Structures are given as C-alpha cells and as structure tokens.
Image (cartoon, rainbow, N blue to C red):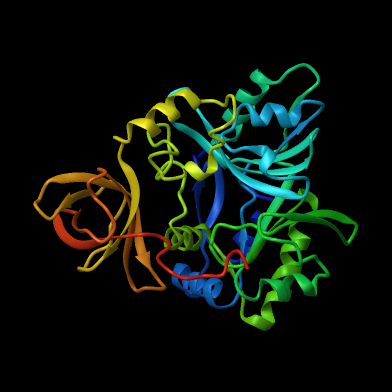
Amino acid sequence: MSETSALRTSPIHDRHVALTAKMADFGGWEMPIEYPGGGVVAEHAAVRERVGLFDVSHLGKVFIRGEGAAELVNTTLTNDLTRIGPGQAQYTMCCDESGGVIDDLIIYLRGVGDLFLMPNAANSATVVDKLRAEAPEGVEVEDHHDDFAVLAVQGPRSDEVLTALDLPIDHDFMSYDTARWRDHELTVCRTGYTGERGYELVAPAAAGLELWDALVEAMAPYEGLPCGLGARDTLRTEMGYPLHGNDLSPQITPVMARAAWAVGWDKERFWGKDALVSQRVAKSSRLLRGATVTGRGIPRPGCAVRDSEGTEVGVVTSGTFSPTLKQGIALILVDRVVTWGDAIVIDVRGRDVAATVTKPPFVEVQATS
C-alpha cells in the first residue's frame, strides 16, 4: 500500500479528483493544495476580491457532552469559556505542562453540557485522549472526525452565496446559527482562517457533496473558485494568523506567539498555567513578530534572522510570497530586542535578503464586519 493510499479522505474527495486538484498529506488526510486554472495566486485573489470555497473536512470534530462538560473544557484549555455564551465560538489552545501548545482549536458552545470542538487534523486524537483522561464521570468526549464535512465560504461575496442557499448570514463574528438545508442540519459559523468575511459550514458527511455542488453553483455569478489549502496558507499568513507546527508548537507557547489574549489568566487552573505565568512574568522568551521583505527573495520556515549588525536573533516560522502585496512576508520568532520597524536580514538559501519588522496583519480586510 502506498503512502498516499493510506491517507484518510474527505467527503468531498471525489470532487477534488474530478477537478484534477493537486493533492497532498495534511495531518494524515489527502487534501487539495490547488486546482488547475491559476493555482494558489488565482484562488487567493478570488477570496480577497470575490469569494472562494475551501474543503477543510480534515479538521477534527469532537463533542463533549454531559453535566460538567463546560467545566472540563474551562479547567483544561487556555481561554476562559465564561467569556462567551451559547451560540458563540471561541479560539483556545491545548497546552502541555511546560506551556507548549499541543494544538489550537475552536470551541462551539452549544450549552453548559454540550460543546463542539474543532481541533487540527494531526492533533485531534491527542486532544481527545487528553480530555478523556481528565473527564469526570458523566462527561463523554466523543470523536466524530469522519462524520462531518466542513466547508469554508470566504470572501466579500460570501453573504450572497449563503443567501442563495437560504442559509443564515446575520449573526456576529465568532457566533453561529443552525439551519435546515435539504433535510440536513447545518451549523453555520461566522469564522474562517483568511481574514475575509466568511463562514464555516459543518454538515453531515453524507450531505457534503450535495452542499459542495450547491455552493459552487451559487458562487458562479461572482466568479468564485474552489480553493486549496495552499491559498488558505497564503491568506492566513497575510493576516499573521499562526499555524500549529510553525508558529505554535510544543516549543512555542502562547506567550511567545503573542497570543496571551486567548488565555484566561484569572482562571484557577488550566493545562500549562504555572509555566505560562512564569514565562509571562520573566519577559525573557522570544516573541513572534512579522517581517516584510524589502529585498528580493521569499522567506521560508527555518531561515535564520539577523539584525543589522549581523547577529543571529531569531528564525522564520512561516514565510511566503504575498499575492496581494507582491512581495515576501514572514512570521518570525525573535529576541525581544527586535521590535517593530527594525531593519533585519533573512538568510534565504545562503543569500541575505533585507526585510523590515512589521506588525501583522500585512493587509487590510473586513473579517469582523
């Protein structure tokens, strides 16, 4: 059996194959990187200017049910669940005792005894195992990784696309609604990973192909495109959104990633709290910042970062060519002496490339409108 044939596949897999998408392994799932007819640049532009459709069904799907479900989540994951109510979603992190990030994920709060979590594909099983080990009697942690399709409609025309399917569009950013569509129950959340106005639709796996086809048809008047995970990466990098495994990891904590806003510091406990509090007080760890290339070159993860004196001060965690800005951009983990506006040098394959430390996002969008 080949490595590719052993990968799990999305409920939308047949459509990707029919469109001759370039496929790759994402967390053990065979998912589309890009489609013919323009690839990443065209798909990126479609989302920034019009609308694009992503299959992100590789993401985990976990239900936590029972009396004490909300308390389980709030005493283990970083963010403070009491900040939101039913019908809202929250970004949070699952840390180890050293404060390192095992995963970052979205929580959908359905009720104090009913939560839906969406971890990253590669880490979903680990998050499930850790929560199950901590769960008190009467609380069930249910792994439904294969039971749902997740489709992201992203871009300025996303409202029109959902309206064509009679799906709700009036709820606030980081909130969700439920809807019946052709006898299927959908969760429609005002979330996404692109920075643009958009939605993520969670549907039963059996409805995935039907929903994909309907969304593709609804996008056609706006020249919308199916988009692969390559464009999703360039879009999120332009926003400065961290990617687990690059900008968040067991070695890169929420403090280092400048994601302290997603930590409930006043909570009595959560995994990794003591280590994170100590790191926050010490103020000595490296921090995640942005960089805009002013020379010629595209930074990539692992490239060394040096200051104007030639001293190595950090490393690129995410780097790409920005289709919007037409230049290289990066997220960099650097010493605290490096700050906004500083001139730096990035070693790109042995060649010095000039850059400026820049505060993300690198482009202006209307995500929370």
Q: Looking at this view, is 298 or 178 the one in front?
A: 178
* Rendering coords of residue 235 (x, y %): 48, 63
Residue at the spot 65% in from the left edge and 81% down from the top edge: 222
Q: Quadrant of residue 280?
A: top left
* Rendering coords of residue 220 (x, y %): 67, 79
Q: Inspect this view and state whether residue 61 appears.
A: no
Residue at the spot 70% in from the left edge and 45% down from the top edge: 84
Q: Looking at this view, is 262 or 295 the one in front?
A: 262
- Asked if residue 40 is positioned above or below residue 60 in the image, the reply reads below
Q: Quadrant of residue 210?
A: bottom right
Q: Quadrant of residue 212?
A: bottom right
Residue at the spot 67% in from the left edge and 61% down from the top edge: 199
Q: Inspect this view and state whether residue 331 appears.
A: yes
In the visual, does 68 lie left or right of 107? right
* Rendering coords of residue 364 (x, y %): 47, 71
Residue sticking out furthest to the bottom: 221
In the visual, does 166 lie left or right of 22? right
Residue sticking out furthest to the top: 137
Quarter of the picture holding the C terminus: bottom right
* Rendering coords of residue 356 (x, y %): 24, 62
In the visual, does 75 lie left or right of 246? right
Residue sticking out furthest to the right: 183
- Asked if residue 262 is positioned above or below residue 350 in the image, the reply reads above
Q: Looking at this view, is 359 or 20 the one in front?
A: 359
Residue at the spot 42% in from the left edge and 45% down from the top edge: 258
